[in-house]
Amino acid sequence: MKYLLIVISFFLLSLPTIYGKVKVCTTTSLIQNLAQEIGGGFIEVENLMGPGVDPHLYKATASDIKKLRSADIIFYNGLHLEGRMVDVFESLAEQGKAVFAVTDGIDRSSLLTLGGNAGYDPHVWFDPDLWSQCAQKIFIELKKFDSQNAMHYQKQTDSYKASLKNLYRWAKELADTLPAPSKILITSHDAYNYFGSAFGFQVIGVQGISTVSEAGLADIISTIDYIKKHKIKAIFIESSVSPAAIERIAQDSGAKIGGKLFSDSLGKKGEILDEYDVGNYLGMFKYNMTTIVKNLK
Ligand code: ZN
């Protein structure tokens, strides 16, 4: 009996190597990181957009299509973040491919709407609670696809959700050290609305919600006026967006550039900034929050 148990457990442990790991393909480095946290050693992830790549503008290349086709499961953000890849996902889904938007795991009532018929704001990762719901979506789909390792995915998910809860607590405490009038965050584009509502910041993105259109002169002038009127000390450039508009606003308004924030992409793998590993979500988030608080104080 004991021998049988040993054989069975050896067999179970070696299943991933017998059957191979689940092949996952993701679009952004944020989703790549999230999938890796949930899948642990049981999946292998191919990612399409590297650090600093802007998902609003990204078009799939021929080699991307190959990667997408050979994946067992595809996870993308959705809510039109990958605005120029929508057709690709639709056609893959029609062909029976397992394609999932991680934001489908979020209760619609928790999403921020854009004006008119523009749909929802896609930058959900800046609220750790919403990101936790995306983690759950990845968990559900991995469990469905690879049910024999469900326990493993469950354990990974529980542990990562606890990390996200701790991150929220840590970030809230730090944000609350700023007096309310200083909690104004000005950046290149509107990536931080969820961040603003989670941590009590008023948020202004000069280029609007997508980076498809560049900042207009009127936007630049009104931002300069706003900065002068509210005596804002610092504004921020973003890692995946051209800094031109922010640099010009800084010059003409007298506000300093408080540094580079990560918006729609993580840093390079293992890249350490101010003691934080910005190649993963938790480190990136902490780096952003400390940079913001330090410069607005
Ligand atoms: Zn964006």
Image (cartoon, grey):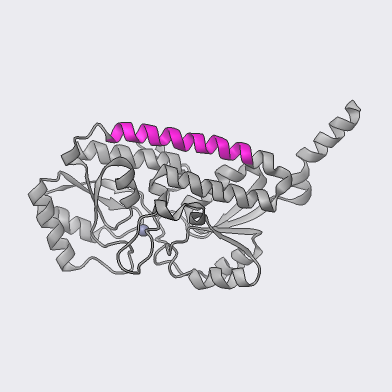
Can you give x and y, in whole percent of width and height, for residue 131 in the image? 46, 46
Residue 169 belongs to the span the image colors magenta: yes
Q: Is residue 13 visible?
A: yes
* Count of residue discs: 0
In the image, 222 versus 180, the foreground residue is: 180
Q: Quadrant of residue 242?
A: bottom left
Quarter holding ligand 1: bottom left
Q: Is residue 3 above or below residue 206?
A: above
Q: Quadrant of the C terminus?
A: top left
Q: Magenta segment range?
A: 154-175
Any part of residue 252 in sight: no
Q: Is residue 95 left or right of residue 12?
A: left
Q: Is residue 13 left or right of residue 200?
A: right
- Residue 149 point in image, percent of width and height: 70, 43
Q: Position of residue 288 (x, y in %)?
A: 33, 42
Q: Is residue 290 left or right of residue 29?
A: left
Which residue is pictured at 40% across the width and 51% down the height?
A: 110
| Magenta: main secondary structure | helix
Q: Residue at x 76, y 38 (%)?
A: 13
Observer-nearest residue: 259 or 120? 120
The residue depicted at 56 percent of the width and 59 percent of the height is 100
Q: Nearer the viewer, residue 213 or 53?
A: 213
Judge by depth and name the residue closer to the eye, 2 or 274: 2
Residue at figure coordinates x 90%, y 29% from the top left: 3
> Is residue 108 on the magenta stretch?
no
Q: Residue furthest front?
A: 109
User: Can you say which quadrant of the picture contains the N terminus?
Assistant: top right
